Image: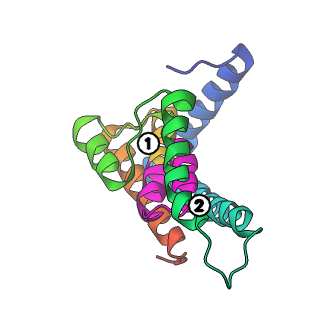
Amino acid sequence: MHQFPKNMKRIYKRIMIWRIRHLTDSQFMAILSIIIGFTVGLAALVIVKSVHFIQSILRSSFSDNEFNYWYLAFPAIGIGLTVLFIKFGLRLKIRHGIPNVLYSISKNNGEIQRHNMFSSIIASALTVGFGGSVGLEGPTVATGAAYGSNIGKFFRLTYKQRVLLLGSASAGAMAAIFKAPLA
């Protein structure tokens, strides 16, 4: 299942044995939820900061007091860059947002492909950063769910445990994007 070098396989095996001997499933899930919450919060921060960075680069040479025709072209440029990234850079099918999460739960045993941990960040940052009319909530949820799913796969969790992590990560992502860390 995992493609590790020999010494990493040994470490992974030791971690798994230690976890089985010393932690109950609920304790392990609590630890994983904390790790996932932190990771998803960072992913949400990366998405937001990437969008603001792209916007600041695009607006740096323009005066805010004057109308500029580039503002009409920027969304099309952003969407074009996103299409190029998906078609030639990623070369994989990308799904965004909550439909992707629901599809993975209902049809794919709660498994989301690994590329979704970064592809939604890049695609949404390009689209929104250039002024595209989409929100960051869906891509942030998709990214969070991908982290939850892949951490669940990494630790060989059951379907129910994976879906629990996927849901927790999605909720954490939504809370992070709306700056509600206690939610």
Q: Is residue 137 above or below residue 19?
A: below
Q: Is residue 146 above or below residue 183?
A: above
- The residue at the point 52 percent across, 55 percent down is 127
In the picture, the disc for residue 129 is 2
Q: Is residue 150 above or below residue 138?
A: above
Q: How many marks?
A: 2
**Would you say residue 54 is visible in this rendering?**
yes
Q: Amino acid at mark 1?
A: Ser
> Outermost residue toward the left?
106
- The residue at the point 29 percent across, 36 percent down is 109
> Outermost residue toward the bottom?
65
Residue 149 falls in image quadrant: top left
Q: Position of residue 47 (x, y in %)?
A: 59, 59
**Would you say residue 37 is visible in this rendering?**
no
Q: Position of residue 138 (x, y in %)?
A: 41, 59
In the picture, the disc for residue 105 is none
- Read off the magenta span: 117-145
In the picture, the disc for residue 149 is 1
Q: Amino acid at mark 2?
A: Gly
Q: Is residue 37 left or right of residue 111?
A: right
Residue 120 included in the magenta stretch of the image: yes
Main SS, magenta region, reads: helix
- Which of labels 1 and 2 is toward the front? 2
Q: Position of residue 146 (x, y in %)?
A: 46, 45
> Outermost residue toward the top?
6
In front of the other: 56 or 10 = 56
- Give neighbour class at mark 1: few <14, some 14-19, many 20+ (Cα, 10 Å): many
In front of the other: 32 or 44 = 44
Secondary structure at badge 2 equals helix
Q: Position of residue 133 (x, y in %)?
A: 43, 64
Gap in Å between the C-alphas at discs 1 and 2?
Answer: 27 Å
